[in-house]
Image: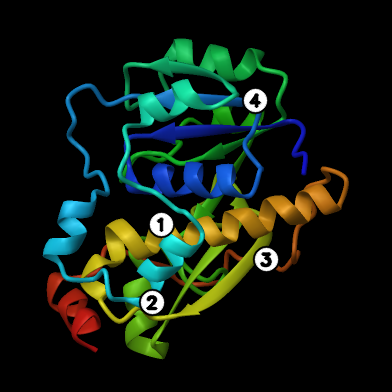
Amino acid sequence: MKINKIALIVTDTTRSKVYLSLLEYHNLLPKFILYLRDRKLKYIYGNKLNLKKNNIVKNKYINEFKKLKIDIDFNIQDKLSKLKTVYKSFDTTDIHRSDVIDLIKNRNEDTFIYSGYPGVIIKNKEILKIKKFLHIHGGYLPKYKGSTTNYFSIIERNKVGASAIILNNDIDSGPILYRKEFSAPLFKESMDHLYDSYFRGQVLIKTLKKIAKNKNKILPLRKKDQKTSENYYIIHPVLKHIAIML
């Protein structure tokens, strides 16, 4: 299955590892990958030892990882070197760096799948004019916009969600391409660095298959104005603990 004119931006995160594994498994790897490398190793990587310590390998979603051959126990640099795709790496966690922007600007691809570092968002509005950025938001849009929204949806509805959007100048308000809700996982303490990535990955694959089916046309799911929906902010630790214990 071909996804022409789409590239991928990856970082040293569990989410990027899940994306790479799923894209490889479904034969949807883009022809070009941009790797923003974290030399200081500040970010959390998914690794099997941590998963075993949390005793979540029994969960049905972990079994899904195995069934779909999703692997998160690898070094991204090593992975990219083995894949049959062109990639370019930069020693920065900042997509706003001038040489990174220049590369994106000069690439032939129209759209970049963005899997950035935690808390690093595209703040420069000019970048959004250069290319389209496909982002998988961790929440069911347009209801749950903002940060850590899946904890709020767990408290309210015992569900989590993920939504594919094209980034624009407003928070989580771009055109929705695809969205899906999932049952809240049993071991919610691993929501941030495991299940959130897994759910987003599932939505990414569905979105890319939809684009390929539509002959590489990116068609929004709905045109409703989302600016009237509520923005959520980083959840308070007490509320987060309540969501995990539910």
Q: Looking at the picture, does residue 185 appear above or below residue 39?
A: below
Residue 197 coordinates in the image, percent (x, y): 40, 57
Q: Earlier in the sequence, mark 2 or mark 3?
A: 2
Which residue in the protein does label 3 denote? 225
Which SS class for mark 2?
Answer: helix
Please state which of the two labelled residues, at mark 2 or mark 3, is closer to the viewer: 2
Please state which of the two labelled residues, at mark 1 or mark 4, is closer to the viewer: 1
Residue 187 coordinates in the image, percent (x, y): 25, 76
Please state which of the two labelled residues, at mark 3 or mark 1, is closer to the viewer: 1
Residue 147 coordinates in the image, percent (x, y): 35, 60
User: What distance separates the C-alpha of mark 1 from that of mark 4?
Assistant: 27 Å
Residue 197 image label: 1
The crowd level at tag 4 (other Cα within 10 Å; few <14, some 14-19, many 20+) is some
The crowd level at tag 1 (other Cα within 10 Å; few <14, some 14-19, many 20+) is many
Please state if 79 lies on the left or on the right of 210 as rendered: left
Residue drawn 66% across and 59% down?
Answer: 206
The crowd level at tag 3 (other Cα within 10 Å; few <14, some 14-19, many 20+) is few
Q: Earlier in the sequence, mark 1 or mark 4?
A: 4
